[in-house]
Image (spheres, helix red, strand yellow):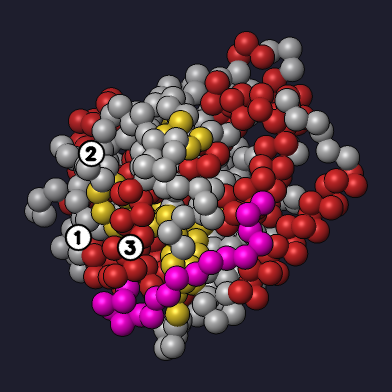
Amino acid sequence: MIPMPHRLTLSAMSALIRARKLSPVELIDAHWKQIAAHNPAVNAFVLTLEESSRQAAREAETRQMQGEFDGPLHGVPVTIKDSFNIAGLPTRCGSRFLGLTPAADDAALVARLRRAGAIPLGKTNCPEFLANYETDNFIAGRTNNPWNLARTPGGSSGGESAAIAARFSAGGIGSDGGGSIRVPAHFTGIAGLKPTPGRCSAAGHVPTICHPGGLLGVAGPMARTVEDVRILFEVLAGHDTNDPFSAPVPLTRPNLAGLRIGVVEQFYQVPVQPSVRDAVRKASTLLSSAGIAVDSFAPQGLDRAPNLWWFFFGILPAPFTQEIIAGREDQAHWTGTEFLHQALAEPQPSAKQLIERLAARDAMRASLLRQMRDTPVLLMPACGVTAFPHRQRRYPTPAKEISQFEAMMPATPVNLLGLPSLAVPIAQDRDGLPVGVQLIGRPWEEELLLEIGARLEQARGLFPTPPGF
């Protein structure tokens, strides 16, 4: 028997199962013991699939003993954010207003995980309507950060990041419309990839990721290491006619020869906390020591990007959310209405304004891609602050106190412009909380980010485990 197999990396689990040194039954059992011991405090799940996962593990073990393997994730336990359909189960998105009818089919990424041999353990918690940087709702309650239960794991993929960090699963899938994979990954000390729209199919996600919101929102993998995220990405990536953004982009082997990485320590004049800046500088030094050229980079013409993002993420969809809760406002959770109230306080845009903002977004994207022609990867903070106490909305920095909107400015322009980005844990702040960075690339160049992230991870060394987990 391998002691504490739930603490292994996904890649190690897979290799040991394939070598017949680790039983899927033993591995699933270890995860359920971990969940029983720690999920009451963390509260990462909306629902669990213990019986079906144990049955799947027994079947996987039988095939393992016969030398038959379903794929690279044979017998590996995963979790699924509760915004992805699982056949026969409701998809609630943290809301009393959604998920009243069980899903007829698995979401595309859930189906791809199953075909690769992965075993879902449950659906993880999220804020109502996926509309907050904290994870809380009336369905399952509040999710806490395994590093410090008084802090948030972030949102909207907060339950997913908490589950992975707490060793409840080896990895899983989240979605990201304004930092919702990368910010929780940064808050909980794991890795997460926000792909280019369409690189990983979002078919079967709730709400539907289509135009125009699909310019911002994507589905992507999360795990404790970049190497594990890469394994998941290779399983999940691929063309899907059910995703309107999908394109037949094959997996590639990146070439780092002559690569230059641009370092951006903060978004223009918006300050970040010292530990966040220190993590970017540490990552820059580690990359340089690994033989990768790094230079400072000052993006031009992006200063209004967070405001444009807010237009598409907050203001434009607000009337649709308002329609869902109309007459039942008292049943809506604060995580679903905090941004909604802000958006509804602003004038609703005309069709002319929508077209103008789409054009401004496209021009901004083209300008940045021209600037990235010789510097195809940027290194930035994942967020301006580390995991904050539940319900905190203003954050101290040496320069000034910043708002949540300002704290998220390193993350949201990436969504606006449809770029891939990888969050990588780098250090800990003075309170012991994780601090990550993000690597931002050009469209369809996820493999390059994953290769750089893996080298950064190797130079960094083993990242600590949350105390007690």
Residue shown at 20% from the left, 64% from the top = 461
- Above/below status of 257 relative to 209: below
Q: CA distance from mark 2 to mark 3?
A: 19 Å
- Above/below status of 355 relative to 296: above
Between label 1 and label 2, give the one nearer the viewer: 2
**Residue position for label 2:** 431
Around disc 3, counting alpha carbons within 10 Å, would you say few (fewer than 14), some (14 to 19), or many (20 or more)?
some
Give the mark, 1 or 2, whose residue is nearer the N terminus: 2
Q: CA distance from mark 3 to mark 1?
A: 18 Å
Q: Quadrant of the C terminus?
A: top left
- The answer to which quarter of the image holds residue 47 is top left
Q: Amino acid at mark 3?
A: Arg
Query: Disc 1 vs disc 2: Cβ atoms closer than 8 Å?
Result: no
Where residue 208 sits in the image (x, y, percent)? 68, 44
Where residue 308 sits in the image (x, y, percent)? 69, 48
Between label 3 and label 1, give the one nearer the viewer: 3
Q: Is residue 131 left or right of residue 391?
A: right
- Taking the magenta stretch, the answer to whether it contains residue 232 is no
Give the mark, 3 or 1, whose residue is nearer the N terminus: 3
Q: Amino acid at mark 2?
A: Asp
Residue shown at 48% from the left, 42% from the top = 407
Checking the image for residue 462, the label placed there is 1
Secondary structure type for disc 2: loop
**Residue position for label 3:** 281
Residue shown at 23% from the left, 31% from the top = 38
> What residue range appears in magenta?
287-304
Nearer to us in this view, 233 or 356:
356
Q: Is residue 15 left or right of residue 222?
A: left
Checking the image for residue 262, the label placed there is none
Q: Is residue 258 left or right of residue 464?
A: right
